[in-house]
Image (cartoon, rainbow, N blue to C red):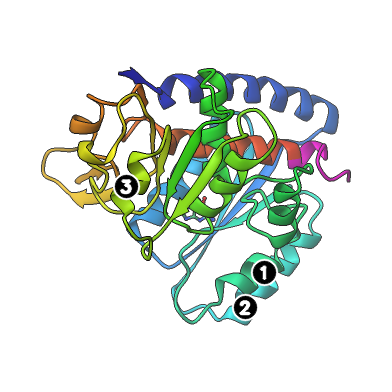
Amino acid sequence: MNLLDGKLVSAKIKEDIKQEAASFTAQAGRKPHLVAILVGNDGGSETYVASKMRNCELVGFESTNIRYDVDITEAELLAKIGEINEDPTIDGLIVQLPLPKHIDPDKVTEAIDYRKDVDGFHPINLGRMQRNLPCFIPATPYGIMLMLEHYGIETSGKKAVVVGRSNIVGSPMSILLARNSTPGNCTVTLTHSRTANLKEEILAGDIVVAAIGRKNFVTADMVKEGAVVIDVGINREESAETKSGFKLYGDVDFEGVSKKASWITPVPGGVGLMTIVGLLKNTLEAAKGTIYPK
Ligand code: GUN
């Protein structure tokens, strides 16, 4: 078993981003600027947004966190997004998901100017991604592709099984792995809660991406000997063992699966750190106007 080490790869890529951000700042007279909107006080979302903001500072970006109470109206939120869309000093905007039930996440996603959509969730970016055109790629799948690229994992002609069809991870991941690019050129099976014979599907995978949000769901008996296993799960449970009071568990039973996998990501220290890198890279591209010229 070899470790796909998110700590190592993210540190290396963040160093490159930091240098590029410094060049941008010297030329433009301002830093790349990311705004994150957080509605309510979901513990997980608070942690993720705080980490995104902290990492922006680390690489020399400006970051703004706008917080709203859980009862903000959809109209108020959409109005704020409209304001940010028009602000030339803001390069990237993300609205942390999930949102409260009374706010339609599709409306919110489509309200964000696709040129500032550094989450890559807007239908224009998703459509362009599917067509292999320049676009913002959703941060987690983007981070996973950067990880595969860093370690030179052969993907062409391989059978990839993605477990979970979310808009944020599973669905875009399946598109990226199937695209005619490197990494890519996989034969992809996108599995979900209605998939028949899920275990057999996963067992056929040379590459398995687990993104279902269930602690230790993928066990050793479900994985082919020598498979590359990517664990997207960040399942938080209260724990007296850690300083934060929480412990993270992946969607993969690392203990068992690592004995069969050729490569595997740990949790924590794997995909989560690469998601941040994906977001930072998108924000830098948004500032530079390389994908969508300003
Ligand atoms: N919630 C879980 N992951 C993400 C993400 O990548 N972006 C946003 N905006 N919300 C999320």
Image coords of residue 266 (percent x, y): 32, 30
Write the residue at 70% across / 50% down: 130
- Where are the magenta residues, as a range? 286-294
Question: At 63% from the left edge and 81% from the top edge, which residue is drawn?
Answer: 75
Between 22 and 169, the one lying in front of the other is 169
Q: Nearer the viewer, mark 3 or mark 2?
A: 3
Residue situated in front as seen by the camera: 27 or 93: 93
Can residue 160 be seen here? yes
Asked whether mark 1 and ligand 1 are closer than 8 Å, the reply comes as no
Of badges 3 and 1, nearer the viewer stands 3
Q: Amino acid at mark 1?
A: Lys
Foreground pick, 189 / 144: 189
Q: Position of residue 35 (x, y in %)?
A: 62, 52
Give the labeled residue for mark 1: 80
* Residue 31, horizontal then vertical, whole percent: 72, 35
Tell me the residue at 54%/22% (across/down): 154
